[in-house]
Every structure is written in C-alpha cells, then in structure tokens.
Amino acid sequence: MHTTPRRARWTTAAATTALLAAFAAGTAIPASAAVPMTAATTPTSTSTSAAEPVPLPPLSPAALRKAIAGLPNGDVTGALVRVTGSAGRWSGTSGTADLTTGRPVPADARFRIGSISKVFTAAVVLQLAAEHRLDLNGTVQRYLPGLLPADYPPVTVGELLDHTSGLPGGGGADFWGDGTNQWFVDHRFDSWTPRQVVEGLVSGQSMDFAPGSAQEYNGLNTFIAGLVVEQVSGRSFAQEVHDRIIRPLGLHATSVPAVDDPRCPVRTPTAI
C-alpha cells in the first residue's frame, strides 16, 4: 500500500490540554522531548526468526543527555526520559516543570501520553468488534449520521484504525485561528467536545484521498473512533477505557481526564 508523506499536525498546548483530555488523538506534548533514534538506539534488521528476538543494542547515555539538553527553549519547557528493558536502564530529566517558579521536572512527574492513547482507543474498538457490537466494515456515516459532510464517500471504522480513511488532515484553519504559536498560547485553556473538533476540522475541507487508496497518519481518525465507541456502547469513552483497559491491566497511575480539565497535578494518575 502506498504511504503518503506525513503532514504537520495540530501539536500545540491548546490541543494538548483540551483535545487530549477528550480522546487524545494526534497531539504531542510541548513539555516533553523525544529522544532521536540513532545508530546507538535503533535495532538493526536481521534474518532472525520471530522465535529468536534480536536483543536491543546498549543505550547511549551521551545521546540521551544531548537529546534533552538546553531546556527550556523556545519550543520545549521540560523533558522526562525513562528507559527500561533488556537494553539497559536510564532515567533523566531536564528543564522546568513550572516557568513561573522555575521548579525543575521531577523524576516521578505525571504527564499526558498523547498519541499513545490511540492504542487505547483502537483496543476498545477491536473489543467491541469482537463482541459483534460494531462492524469494522461498517461506515462512519452509518454509526454517526450527519457527522461528516454529505459529499464525503463512505469511510469504514477499519479505515479509521489503519489511517486509510482519506479524511482531511491539514485543514481546520478557521477552527484553529491564525495557527500561530501565540494563538495557541492565548487559547490554551479553551476546550471543545470531540464532535466540535471533528466538525471544525472537516468543515469546508475536501478528502485528502479516496478511502482505502493510501495511508496517512491522522489524529482525526481517532477522534471519530472514540465517538463510534460512545455511540455503540451507550457509555462515555472514559468509562469504556477504564473498564476495558485501565482496570483489567491494573494501570493505577493512568486515567482519562475530563474534556475541559487542563490540569495534570503531580500526585494524580497519568492522563491519557
């Protein structure tokens, strides 16, 4: 399957504090720093069978320190890194957790997990499909009539999960104001319902490609998948995630925050 280039998404403070609290789809946390994959941290490809997993290479402490150095800067305020597993154990913090007080990032800081919540959403959708409560070949238009523009072609739930929906990924200019960093700072405490987000991002936008004809990572897919979960279950997304994923797996430090709650206190569970 052809894969189209990934576009820049709405990865801002406003999207993080408001939208992430709803379904956490496609956003990145400005207060976290990604560790770049280097030759020292990327497993090499071999012909070893699946029964014989390739051991991870040793960590590069120097590369990790470099990745989180120089914080805060104009884009990132702080970083928390913790690596475990067969490659070794490493933990590090950098920058500040509070720009007003200068309080450093604690090693046990809580944080929103951003796009990792897509895994939670997909797991719930697949469980509902296994229970025959929804059909992966069923369309968004069937489950959520009127949500998408009338001239959009049918988009299946399965296409939402594998990012082949073709839904617009770079639109919503009016919804996001002028799109500048300052606009998102000024509106960081604004919140929208997931339905408002979807409607705002598709309004006046055409499909990126025909459903199923290409693949493009798009957070909008997961917002819609979360709405499908609520529609077929008759319960909130937070309830479904808690009862199906968080509680059975004993994820005591994980929770789904309220849509309008931008807080992430130190002594509360990690927000998805």
Image (spheres, grey):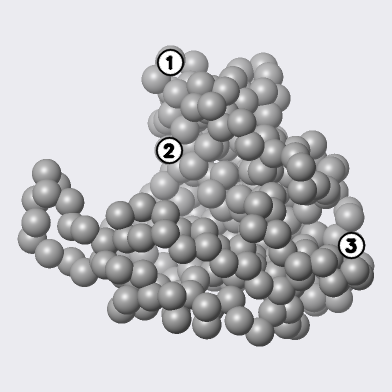
* Number of marks present in the image shown: 3
Residue name at image x 49 percent, y 42 percent? 119
Query: What label sits on residue 132 in the rendered view?
Result: 1
**Cα–Cα span, label 2 and label 1:** 14 Å
For residue 9, side relative to residue 199 (left or right): left
The quadrant in which the N terminus is found is bottom left
Residue 262, image x, y percentages: 83, 49
Labels 2 and 1: the sequence-earlier one: 1
Question: On screen, 74 above or below 249?
Answer: below
Give yes or no for contact between labels 2 and 3 (Cβ–Cβ under 8 Å): no
Give yes or no for contact between labels 2 and 1 (Cβ–Cβ under 8 Å): no
- Note whether residue 265 is visible: yes
Find residue 235 and report its image quarter. top right
Instruction: Give the residue number, with chain letter if any, for mark 2.
Output: 158
Instruction: Give the residue number, with chain letter if any, for mark 3.
Output: 187
Residue 194, image x, y percentages: 73, 42
